[in-house]
């Protein structure tokens, strides 16, 4: 517990400040660890890479919010196309939403593209449980 209190819980935390694993999960990037720590700080239940969707392994699923979050350092053209496919699948088949979280901002991902938002707007959506009226206001 003392270690957690010393951690910086933002996306720009220094790599040396972050643990290598969290809840017996080894992450692929320091940004993913920082994001998981933010979820923990907010008391949000999460699963890391729980299933492959449309040939893509999305980083986080927040079951109580019915939201998926891909945490990216860099976005390739392949990622861009696949994330739009995943967003279309989630909307049509599961009535769930997909977001992308980067060190600088977040995005609501849809079949037709990415809608940017700042981190404060993203966390408001997540903390409010992904309600549709908040999603529309953030876009």
Image (spheres, rainbow, N blue to C red):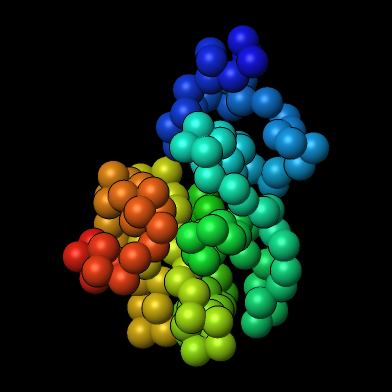
Q: Residue at x 31, y 71 (%)?
A: 132
Choose top left, top right, bottom left or bottom right for residue 116: bottom left
Q: Quadrant of the N terminus?
A: top right
Viewer-closest of 4 and 119: 4
Q: Residue furthest bottom?
A: 92
Could one spot residue 117 in this view of the protein? yes
How far across and how far down the image is residue 20, in percent? 72, 30
Q: Which residue is at a point 59% across and 48% down the rendered structure image?
A: 45
Residue drawn at point x = 58 percent, y = 61 percent: 63
Q: Quadrant of residue 106?
A: bottom left
Query: Looking at the picture, how far across and down is residue 112, in whole percent?
Result: 36, 84
Q: Position of residue 90 (x, y in %)?
A: 53, 80
125 vs 95: above or below? above
Residue visible at 42% across and 84% down? 111
Would residue 122 be seen by someone viewing this image from the given angle?
Answer: no
Q: Nearer the viewer, residue 124 or 116?
A: 124
The residue most toward the left is: 137
Instruction: State whether residue 111 is above or below residue 45.
Output: below
């Amino acid at each position: 517990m003392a270690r957690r209190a010393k951690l910086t819980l933002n996306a720009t935390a220094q790599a040396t400040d972050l643990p290598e694993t969290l809840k017996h999960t080894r992450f692929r990037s320091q940004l993913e660890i920082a994001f998981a720590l933010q979820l923990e700080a907010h008391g949000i239940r999460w699963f890391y890479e729980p299933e492959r969707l449309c040939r893509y392994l999305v980083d986080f699923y927040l079951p109580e919010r019915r939201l998926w979050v891909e945490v990216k350092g860099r976005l390739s053209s392949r990622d861009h196309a696949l994330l739009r496919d995943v967003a279309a699948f989630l909307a049509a088949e599961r009535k769930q939403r997909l977001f992308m979280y980067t060190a600088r901002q977040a995005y609501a991902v849809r079949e037709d593209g990415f809608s940017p938002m700042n981190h404060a707007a993203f966390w408001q959506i997540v903390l409010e449980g992904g309600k549709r009226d908040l999603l529309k206001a953030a876009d």
